[in-house]
Image (cartoon, grey):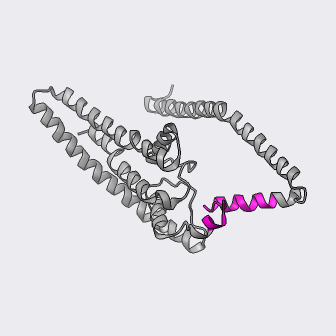
Amino acid sequence: MCSGKTCQVILLALGYIIYLLAGAAVFQMLEHEAENTTKTETQRHKLAFLTNYTCLTQDALEQLVKVITEAVKQGIYPLGNESISKHSNWDFSSSIFFAGTVVTTIGYGTLAPRTAGGQIFCVFYALFGIPLNVIVLGYVGKSLSLWCGKLGKCLYKRGIQKRRAKILTILFFLVTGILVFLGLPPIVFTRMEGWNYREGVYYAFITLSTIGFGDYVGPTPTEITHPIVLWSLFGLYLDWPGLPFCLTY
């Protein structure tokens, strides 16, 4: 027989593994067929392109696709000569956007340093920036905890039971955070980026949870830098740290 603590660790590990396996199974069921459909459509378009342009060989087409794929990986979207020449992923506003994704550990993956100097600097920048970000999050969280306490005391003084006042305070911050950072921003994103509301909610959650897949970022960093950096920073500093501290105030 194992000790109580050992059994807890084993059960926790088994639960974690089962959770991962269950998630993998659901994702596979939901996404695998769509992936195969995309593969089939892509192959069909390639064959149709070769049929319409007989002067282009298979190898030439594959080389073109390779060049375009590499460009997209580096954040360059070759949809026209004008867009390539005018837009820069590393103007100052776009660099602010990137710096914000580094220290908040969002890491979309659509923008990354390619030079040796940029990569080395990124390592040291993140090495100091991420702990600084955690310190700021903790400080803001404690401030929110004080606000929770003041609101709870205010409700208590108005004749509401202490337990109920605490529950109402937590619900207030929870609902306000969800509305301000997950409910309303997608409405703006639908107009800025042409997404539907579901995609906007998905993007908001993936960003604020710092998962940062990078599948939804926007057409160009320059167009979204200021509103999205401000929203994501305020969301991280005001929303996510607030609830845990409110629960313990």
Give yes or no for residue 8 being in the magenta stretch. Answer: no
Q: Position of residue 6 (x, y in %)?
A: 48, 33
For the C terminus, the quadrant is: top left
Residue at horizontal 71 percent and vertical 33 percent from the top: 33
Nearer to me, 184 or 23? 184
Magenta residues, start to end: 62-84
User: Where on the picture, by quarter, is residue 32?
Assistant: top right
Residue at horizontal 39 percent and vertical 52 percent from the top: 231
Residue at horizontal 28 percent and vertical 38 percent from the top: 173
Nearer to me, 172 or 49? 49
User: Where on the picture, by quarter, is residue 55?
Assistant: bottom right
Numbered label tally: 0
Q: Please determine whether, in this image, residue 146 is positioned above or below residue 229.
A: above
Dominant SS type (magenta): helix
Compared across the picture, whether 93 is left or right of 214 comes to: left
The single residue placed furthest to the bottom in the displayed view is 117
Q: Position of residue 192 (x, y in %)?
A: 48, 50
Nearer to me, 195 or 17? 195
User: Where on the picture, by quarter, is residue 115?
Assistant: bottom right
Q: Position of residue 94 (x, y in %)?
A: 49, 64
Q: Please determine whether, in this image, residue 31 is positioned above or below residue 90.
A: above
Q: Position of residue 15 (x, y in %)?
A: 53, 30
Residue at horizontal 9 percent and vertical 32 percent from the top: 157
Give yes or no for residue 63 being in the magenta stretch. Answer: yes
